[in-house]
Image (cartoon, grey):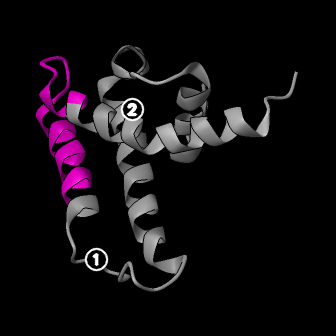
């Protein structure tokens, strides 16, 4: 069954905060290796920073560097911390988790 547009929009709006919470949780979890914690914190800092490789004021393209960097960090985190740890720390929906894996280029 296909989700309604309202459900899909709600899922998409919750996705970004869910990813931010995941990165923060991974940066604090003792099971996550130090270099992976640095990747999580680095991705959070880059997204929060007003200084970007591609300025955010440039329509569409300005956000691509943020999306690309977070996706790369998530891919590294899933590989380094492990799928099970990342899945356990994910606070969003199952559909949101699946979307995060696709965005990160992770195949399970």
Reading the image, the residue beneath label 2 is 79
Horizontal side of 53 relative to 1 (left or right) equals left
Give the left or right position of residue 64, taking residue 26 as reference: right
Neighbour class for label 2 at 10 Å: few (<14), some, many (≥20)? few
Q: Where is residue 108 in the image (x, y as percent from the top left)?
A: 60, 24
| Predominant SS along the magenta part | helix
The foreground one among 87 and 47 is 47
Q: What element carries label 1?
A: loop
Kindly indicate the quadrant of the structure image that contains residue 68: bottom left
Residue ID at (24%, 29%): 26
Q: Quadrant of residue 50?
A: bottom left
Question: Where's residue 71, x and y in %?
Answer: 45, 50
Q: Is mark 2 on a helix, strand or loop?
A: helix
Locate the N terminus and report the quarter of the image it occupies: top right
- Tell me the residue that label 1 is attached to: 52
For residue 47, what is the image quadrant? bottom left
Viewer-closest of 31 and 12: 12
Q: Residue at x 46, y 86 (%)?
A: 58
Would residue 49 appear left or right of 18 to someone viewing this image?
A: left
Q: Which residue is drawn at 59% across and 35% down?
A: 11
1 w.r.t. 61: above or below: above
- Vertical placement of 37 versus 39: above or below? above
Read off the magenta span: 25-45
Query: Which of marks 2 and 1 precedes in the sequence?
Result: 1
Look at discs 1 and 2 and give the one toward the viewer: 1
Q: Residue 108: within the magenta?
A: no
Q: Residue at image x 35%, y 48%?
A: 73
Task: Say whether residue 5 is left or right of residue 75.
Answer: right
């Amino acid at each position: 069954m296909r989700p309604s547009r309202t459900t899909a929009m709600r899922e998409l709006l919750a996705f970004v905060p869910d990813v931010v919470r995941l990165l923060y949780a991974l940066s604090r979890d003792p099971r996550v290796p130090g270099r992976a914690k640095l990747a999580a914190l680095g991705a959070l800092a880059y997204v929060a920073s007003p200084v970007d490789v591609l300025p955010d004021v440039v329509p569409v393209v300005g956000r691509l560097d943020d999306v690309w960097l977070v996706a790369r960090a998530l891919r590294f985190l899933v590989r380094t911390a492990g799928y099970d740890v990342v899945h356990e720390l994910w606070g969003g929906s199952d559909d949101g988790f699946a979307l995060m894996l696709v965005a990160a280029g992770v195949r399970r």
